[in-house]
Image: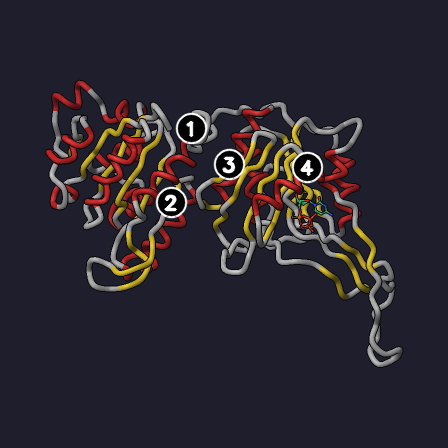
Amino acid sequence: MQGSRILLVIGGGIAAFKSLTLIRDLQREGCRVVPVLTRAAEEFVTPLSVAALAGEDVHRDLFDLTREAEMGHIQLSRDADLVVVAPATADLMAKMAGGHADDLASTLLMATDKRVLIAPAMNVRMWLHPATQRNLATLKQDGVLVVGPDEGDMACGEFGPGRAAEPQDIVAAIRGALGPARPAPLRLGPEVAAKPLKGRHVVVTSGPTREPIDPVRYISNHSSGAQGSAIAAALRDLGARVSFVTGPAQFAPPEGVEVIPVQTADEMQAAVEAALPADAAVMAAAVADWKVANAADRKMKKGRDGMPVLEFAENPDILAWVSQLAERRPQLVVGFAAETNDVIANATAKRQRKRCDWIVANDVSAGTGTFGGEDNTVTLISADGAESWPRMGKDAVARKLAERIAEAL
Ligand code: CTP
């Protein structure tokens, strides 16, 4: 974080006072904070106190010709390493989601080519309102990172989600968003987006597998295929040719990738083998560990021979197999680890055992909502150690991972 430049947009809410602590905490981490106040924010914190604390001019929602000539809003938004909106009010979120640019803050947010992190804070009803939730989903889809809100007593006397995240949690999210390297730009349209993976071939596995018991029954798992689809789409957006080997997922596969539908783990392995050679392999599928060794080729009938007894045989471990190929091993092999406990320790051991280069570890314990949910909290584990990413949408995880893959190749 040392030396990073944060453009901090302070929205007009009671939580604006927390931004004063945030400025100080960020400065302690060696960041430079350039503050922007919306007109409403000035009702809660004074430009003078913000300027004094930040040691910077405060950019305000006043049309200032001299300032505009000296420092255009476009330059202001691009000189930053990260744009942070704290507190992000319902109104600011709506403006961002709708693409409005009718004041300095919303104009900066439209003009920036940097990542944007928002810390929403508002009354619980406003937070739960379908309009806000719709805007939130749109923003996440656009790649905007979100921290909070927390649940608790609110200034308005109600209780529930809507409280601004605490400054130390916002700092942690900023640290994650900045990452060890330069922050990557937001997803842009195809005309302006960089294509660092052009000419590269990546194999992605995704979704669950289905292991037949008889022609009408099978064993499978809860994987929706959401994360794998998002990864394939993100790699495609960066210019890669993607072979997408997918089990029966709940999501339609992304467009613009080669889709290879499979059912069983054996079929998935054969499809991956046929897709090689590749520069990278991302094994996001939830492969069934076992198949039924005595699967019947006719429908099993009840009552004839009592309860059926299923015998199991181990499925091939596709990730371990591809990681240990003597020839045609992709330069970069990325696995996933779905864990319910001791996430980092288990995933680190899994990386070593399967000999892949990276493991994306995620907590799928009950209550995290990862399976089938929109968000994911992941830790990227490599030979260099573990790097925890803030909770973000599966699309944002996919984009960040695709960018990392592009850097590594
Ligand atoms: N994987 C695979 N083939 C298998 C099992 C898993 O390719 N037969 C891959 C998954 O795609 C994922 C990684 O291995 O990238 C880890 O999957 P996970 O289910 O977390 O691990 P397991 O091998 O099942 O290990 P454990 O039972 O110890 O959790």
Q: Kindly report which numbered mark, 1 or 3, lies closer to the viewer in this rendering.
A: 3
| Secondary structure category for the residue under label 1 | loop
Looking at the rendered structure, the kind of residue marked 3 is Glu
In the rendering, which numbered label is found on residue 251? none
Going from the N terminus, do you reach mark 1 or mark 4 first? 1
Q: Position of residue 138 (x, y in %)?
A: 39, 47
Q: Kindly report which numbered mark, 3 or 2, lies closer to the viewer in this rendering.
A: 3
Q: Kindly report which numbered mark, 1 or 4, lies closer to the viewer in this rendering.
A: 4
In the rendering, which numbered label is found on residue 352? 4
Please give left or right for residue 279 compared with residue 135 in the image: right
**Quadrant (top left/top right/bottom left/bottom right) for the C terminus:** top right
Asked whether 38 or 257 is in front, the reply is 38
Report which residue position mark 1 lands on: 183
Instruction: Tell me the distance, in whole angstroms, between the alpha carbons under discs 3 and 4.
Output: 16 Å
Please give left or right for residue 395 compared with residue 129 in the image: right
Report which residue position mark 2 lands on: 146
Looking at the rendered structure, the kind of residue marked 1 is Pro
Looking at the rendered structure, the kind of residue marked 2 is Val
Going from the N terminus, do you reach mark 1 or mark 2 first? 2
Instruction: Tell me the distance, in whole angstroms, between the alpha carbons under discs 4 and 2.
Output: 32 Å
Asked whether 353 or 58 is in front, the reply is 353
Q: Which residue is drawn at 52% across and 43% down?
A: 378
Quadrant in which residue 142 is drawn: top left
Please give left or right for residue 218 compared with residue 21 in the image: right
